[in-house]
Image: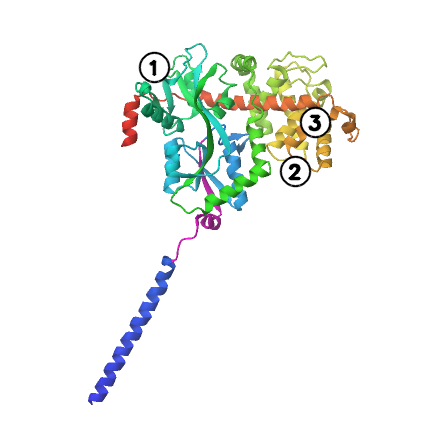
């Protein structure tokens, strides 16, 4: 009996042990996945299929042109995403501080926003190799006092963007130079360099000076011809992408390899040329453009808009063509006989159904239809923005000559769908050794058409940013930098 009892007890213990072992094994199996190390950031991005990038709206970063998303930073980010074989998703921030915080918290994978690499920022973020060098310009309006140094600025006259490299530099200058202890400035959140330039340009604004990056000022000079650079507050500084410093370095290493590649294959230089290469500043020309934009354009703006709406075009592009052709003068006439606001030849006017070339409405409608015809006729392989630039060149020098330039590009075994290759070859069509190889022969205006496209791009972008400027509202009145510094500390 005792033996049977012991056997039963042993079986009971064994059963309990088996159940405990099974439960323990199950528990281990359940928790093992949670204990596995997290994949590297780059692997997680590839698994999700999406690269999330923080940026800001602006001419050097991200904007809409020809109804397409574009911008130097946008194009860079898109190429990097393609390099990783994922899609890119841009998140825009009005406030620079919020953008930087998004990088720190991991809300985004990186920031591509024209960020200057500074000493303080380098402590908080991991920066890629630089892709551009800029300087900090102190800007003032012509006709006002031109300061020689920041020490000459009076209280409340200088305004900068909060959390920017400009404000960081001012704080460092003030703390390290005893002669600058009196220096004060105002900081604005949720604003842009365009807004600050707009304020300094306004004679009634309390803001007399601002600090902007040299590349930004260069792109805005055509719509602010009265603004000047007093001096460089700080010399050459690098721009780079910012990444979370607490994350692993997998995405950073991928970005470094990417920048190394586009530096070597010329992609980066092509992007610089695309966004900055057409921005030559002509003071007299810029003043004339602004004057005509104020006085002449309003008479025809609704006509441009109506024609653009009908043909699914940007009215500002049509207006830019009209300005390049005639300075928005419906009675303009050239020595070769083209006339009217859109300067149509007699043959083109008849083809487009224009009865009176000096009638502004007919000229705009006819010119718009002709441009659209050229645009649609181009090969499908010519994509935006190159497609628009090809069509502009064809409007000026003829469709056949543009196609001949493509043929020369094919002979040279380069990309015949790339405007930057075509614009090298259009001027060659004046030389017998080149025009004798192509169907349409000699082209007198090949070189002229390159400048034609360059000018229209400049006028178009000026119209884009001028219309943007009209919508800007001034920020609240400046506050003393002492209060700003106290707020930064807390």
The kind of secondary structure element at disc 3 is helix
Q: Is residue 403 above or below residue 211?
A: below
Q: Quadrant of residue 68?
A: top right
The residue that appears at 37% across and 37% down in the rendered structure is 123
Q: Which residue is mark 1?
A: 154
Disc 3/disc 1 C-alpha distance (Å) = 53 Å
Left-right relation of 159 to 328:
left
Please tell me the numbered disc located at residue 319.
none
Left-right relation of 27 to 70:
left
The residue that appears at 73% across and 34% down in the rendered structure is 407
First reached walking from the N terminus: tag 1 or tag 2: 1
Q: Relative to the observer, which residue lies in front, 171 or 198?
A: 171
Provide the residue span drawn in magenta. 36-56
Q: Quadrant of the C terminus?
A: top left
Rendering coords of residue 309 (x, y %): 57, 27
Q: Is residue 197 above or below residue 270?
A: above
Q: Relative to the observer, which residue lies in front, 393 or 215?
A: 215
Confirm or deny contact between disc 3 and disc 1 (CB under 8 A).
no
The residue that appears at 67% across and 24% down in the rendered structure is 395
Q: Is residue 130 above or below residue 214?
A: below
The kind of secondary structure element at disc 2 is loop
Residue sticking out furthest to the bottom: 1
Disc 2/disc 3 C-alpha distance (Å) = 19 Å
Q: Which residue is mark 2?
A: 381
Rendering coords of residue 432 (x, y %): 79, 26
Q: Quadrant of the N terminus?
A: bottom left
Confirm or deny contact between disc 2 and disc 3 (CB under 8 A).
no
First reached walking from the N terminus: tag 3 or tag 1: 1
Rendering coords of residue 142 (x, y %): 46, 12
Q: Residues within 10 Å of mark 1 (few under 14, many from 20)?
A: few
């Amino acid at each position: 009996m005792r033996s049977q009892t012991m056997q039963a007890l042993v079986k009971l213990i064994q059963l309990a042990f088996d159940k405990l072992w099974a439960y323990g094994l199950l528990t281990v199996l359940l928790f093992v996945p949670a204990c596995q190390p997290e994949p590297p950031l780059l692997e997680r991005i590839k698994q999700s299929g999406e690269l999330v990038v923080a940026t800001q709206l602006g001419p050097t970063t991200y904007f809409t042109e020809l109804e397409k998303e574009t911008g130097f930073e946008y194009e860079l980010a898109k190429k990097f995403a393609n390099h990783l074989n994922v899609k890119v998703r841009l998140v825009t921030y009005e406030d620079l501080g919020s953008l930087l915080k998004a990088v720190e918290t991991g809300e985004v994978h990186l920031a591509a926003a024209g960020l200057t690499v500074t000493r303080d920022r380098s402590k908080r973020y991991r920066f890629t190799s630089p892709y551009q060098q800029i300087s900090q310009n102190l800007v003032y309006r012509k006709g006002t006092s031109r300061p020689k140094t920041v020490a000459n600025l009076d209280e409340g006259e200088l305004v900068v963007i909060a959390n920017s490299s400009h404000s960081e530099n001012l704080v460092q200058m003030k703390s390290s130079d005893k002669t600058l202890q009196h220096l004060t400035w105002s900081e604005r959140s949720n604003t842009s360099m365009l807004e600050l330039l707009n304020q300094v340009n306004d004679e009634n604004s309390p803001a007399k000076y601002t600090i902007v990056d040299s590349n930004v000022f260069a792109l805005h000079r055509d719509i602010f011809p009265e603004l000047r650079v007093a001096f460089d507050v700080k010399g050459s500084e690098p721009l780079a992408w910012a990444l979370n410093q607490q994350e692993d370095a997998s995405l950073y290493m991928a970005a470094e390899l990417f920048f190394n590649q586009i530096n070597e294959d010329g992609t980066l230089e092509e992007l610089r040329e695309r966004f900055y290469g057409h921005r030559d500043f002509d003071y007299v020309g810029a003043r004339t453009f602004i004057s005509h934009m104020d006085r002449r354009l309003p008479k025809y703006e609704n006509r441009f808009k109506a024609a653009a709406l009908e043909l699914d075009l940007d009215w500002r592009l049509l207006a830019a063509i009209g300005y390049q052709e005639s300075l928005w003068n419906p009675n303009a006439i050239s020595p070769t006989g083209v006339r009217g606001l859109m300067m149509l030849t007699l043959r083109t006017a008849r083809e487009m159904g224009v009865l009176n070339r000096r009638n502004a409405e007919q000229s705009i409608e006819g010119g718009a239809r002709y441009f659209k015809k050229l645009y649609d006729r181009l090969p499908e392989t010519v994509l935006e923005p190159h497609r628009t630039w090809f069509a502009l060149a064809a409007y000026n020098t003829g469709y056949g000559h543009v196609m001949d330039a493509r043929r020369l590009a094919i002979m040279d075994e380069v990309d015949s769908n790339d405007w930057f290759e075509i614009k090298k070859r259009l001027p060659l069509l004046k030389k017998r050794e080149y025009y004798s190889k192509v169907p349409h022969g000699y082209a007198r205006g090949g070189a002229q058409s390159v400048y034609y496209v360059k000018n229209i791009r400049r006028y178009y972008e000026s119209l884009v940013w001028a219309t943007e400027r009209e919508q800007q509202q001034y920020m609240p009145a400046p506050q003393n930098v002492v209060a700003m510094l106290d707020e930064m500390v807390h």
